[in-house]
Image (tube, grey):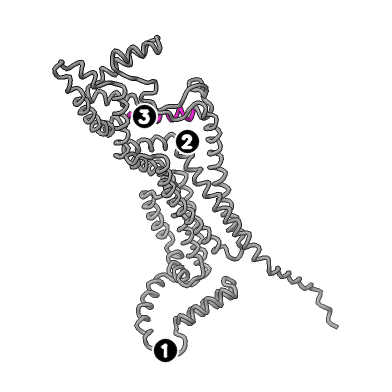
């Protein structure tokens, strides 16, 4: 009698419940929604952190502000107002003119004011003035950051306001219109220790009015420093934490999408695109409303709009980066998908990825260098960003090479050109009806069967590709 077979039969794995996949899809959807919300807040936190709390970015932005014609006109008008508020030009001219010409003092002062209005924007456009402005803003911002971070032996948070001093520009404007002596005389009188009495006597004798705040624009008052310190710390923390959380949630959502990761990756790409578009929309609409609410004067609104556009330039860069990266993710998910155009693209790339991999990397490197020269996103202009992007590109090319090697193991050099020629010749024959599958179709069917037998394609993918092939024959 034959001995019974002692080999145990492996247990049949339990069939997962039907609700497992819908629940996982719902979880992935929730993760993507949270990632989008945190990502939107993170973008604004990163913008504020880079724009307000970074000295280099602040200096660059302030230089662009002064170089803008609209802002030059508005700041020039402010300087002229400060100058003629400090010096009674008409009174000075009246004292200098003969008694018979006293009536010309007021018209001459008005003409001098018009001349100053034309000279002021030209003064602000001079390279020397803009360089001085740049250096002054860099030094002032460093001191401001030091104040926000708690002060030090030179700058402290106790007593006093954080101000932007434009007296140097007023002095240059006064020299341009010839009233620098009157301004200097008034300031010299006010530098003594006799206080308000000397100030009042100087104003009566010289016909000038020099308030303590002349030429000084208050940026931050002393009673607001504590709040500014807390906000700065919060912004820096949010910029790092929310960015990490958002990217982590996107990665977790793609990782949990077992069996449909390409769909999740494509959805993530569209989420990036949506974040970029919403941020651009908020920047434009929010800027218009903010300018309308803060600037009632129509003559100053162009300068305020220019200031908003320049000041939010980094936010625009972030939004553009999200658009670019999102479209790249969508393209990558499509290229690795099971649609007929994607398969045709991979089939066309398979011979080059198998036999001419060095040439492929050479072409990719040239395209990458062109992108770096263009610099469409902040990451393409920084060393760490360039290294990360280069690593991701190499990873993408390698994954594509492995996928094409599995799908098209029989790819041969020159196959892509032969298929193009066959397609051009076959287009002429498609007008004539032909019975039965054509040789090219039989070859594709054999390839699909081979991929299915090796386990590269599952049953559902095999049926779908077979239907597409026969339906397009």
| Label at residue 462 | none
| Residue 409 horizontal/vertical position (percent) | 50, 70
Mark 3 is surrounded, within 10 Å at the Cα level, by few (under 14), some (14 to 19) or many (20 or more) other residues, namely: some
Q: Residue furthest right?
A: 1
The residue positioned 53% from the left and 42% from the top of the image is: 239
Q: Is residue 436 shown above or below 175?
A: below
The residue positioned 44% from the left and 30% from the top of the image is: 219
Q: Residue tagged by mark 2?
A: 53
Q: Residue furthest left?
A: 100
Q: Residue tagged by mark 1?
A: 434
Q: Earlier in the sequence, mark 3 or mark 2?
A: 2
Q: Which residues are magenta?
A: 131-146
State the CA–CA distance, disc 3 to disc 2.
Answer: 17 Å
Q: Name the magenta segment's main secondary structure.
A: helix
What element does badge 3 sit on?
helix
Q: Earlier in the sequence, mark 1 or mark 3?
A: 3
| Residue 52 horizontal/vertical position (percent) | 46, 37
Can you say which quadrant of the picture contains the C terminus?
Answer: bottom left
State the CA–CA distance, disc 1 to disc 3.
Answer: 79 Å
Q: Is residue 273 shown above or below 11?
A: above
Which is in the foreground here, disc 2 or disc 1? 2
State the residue in front, 23 or 376. 23
Picture quarter containing residue 358? bottom left
Can you say which quadrant of the picture contains the N terminus?
Answer: bottom right
Q: Earlier in the sequence, mark 2 or mark 1?
A: 2
| Residue 2 horizontal/vertical position (percent) | 83, 81
Q: Residue tagged by mark 3?
A: 135
What element does badge 1 sit on?
loop
């Amino acid at each position: 009698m034959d001995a019974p077979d002692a080999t145990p039969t492996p247990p049949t794995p339990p069939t997962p419940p039907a609700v497992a996949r819908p629940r996982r899809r719902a979880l992935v959807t929730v993760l993507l929604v949270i990632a989008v919300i945190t990502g939107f807040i993170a973008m604004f936190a990163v913008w504020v952190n880079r724009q307000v709390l970074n000295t280099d970015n602040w200096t660059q932005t302030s230089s662009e502000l002064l170089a803008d014609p609209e802002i030059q006109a508005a700041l020039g008008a402010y300087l002229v107002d400060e100058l003629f508020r400090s010096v009674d030009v008409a009174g000075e001219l009246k004292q200098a003119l003969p008694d018979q010409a006293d009536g010309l003092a007021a018209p001459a002062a008005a003409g001098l004011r018009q001349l100053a209005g034309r000279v002021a924007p030209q003064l602000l456009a001079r390279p020397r003035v803009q360089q001085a402005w740049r250096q002054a803003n860099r030094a002032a911002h460093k001191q401001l950051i030091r104040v926000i971070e708690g002060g030090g032996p030179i700058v402290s948070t106790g007593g006093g306001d954080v101000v932007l001093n434009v007296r140097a520009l007023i002095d240059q404007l006064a020299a341009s219109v010839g009233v620098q002596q009157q301004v200097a005389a008034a300031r010299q009188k006010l530098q003594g220790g006799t206080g308000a009495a000397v100030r009042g006597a100087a104003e009566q004798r010289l016909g000038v009015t020099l308030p303590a705040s002349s030429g000084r624009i208050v940026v931050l008052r002393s009673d607001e420093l504590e709040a500014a310190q807390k906000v700065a710390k919060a912004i820096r923390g949010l910029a790092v934490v929310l960015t990490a959380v958002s990217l982590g949630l996107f990665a977790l959502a793609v990782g949990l999408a077992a069996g449909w990761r390409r769909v999740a990756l494509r959805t993530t790409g569209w989420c990036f695109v949506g974040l970029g578009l919403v941020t651009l929309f908020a920047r434009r609409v929010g800027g218009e409303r903010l300018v309308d609410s803060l600037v009632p004067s129509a003559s100053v609104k162009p300068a305020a709009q220019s200031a908003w556009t320049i000041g939010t330039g980094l936010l625009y860069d972030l939004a553009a980066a999200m658009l670019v990266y999102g479209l790249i993710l969508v393209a990558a998910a499509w290229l690795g998908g099971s649609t007929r155009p994607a398969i045709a693209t991979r089939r066309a790339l398979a011979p080059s990825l198998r036999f001419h991999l060095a040439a492929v990397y050479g072409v990719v490197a040239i395209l990458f260098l062109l992108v770096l020269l263009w610099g469409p996103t902040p990451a393409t202009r920084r060393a760490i960003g360039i290294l990360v992007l280069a690593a991701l590109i190499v990873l993408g090319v390698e994954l594509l090479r492995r996928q094409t090697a599995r799908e098209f193991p029989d790819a041969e050099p020159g196959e892509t050109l032969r298929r193009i020629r066959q397609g051009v010749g076959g287009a002429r024959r498609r007008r004539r009806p032909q019975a039965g599958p054509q040789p090219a179709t039989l070859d594709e069917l054999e390839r699909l069967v081979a991929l299915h037998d090796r386990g590269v394609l599952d049953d559902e993918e095999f049926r779908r590709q077979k239907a597409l092939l026969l339906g397009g024959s």
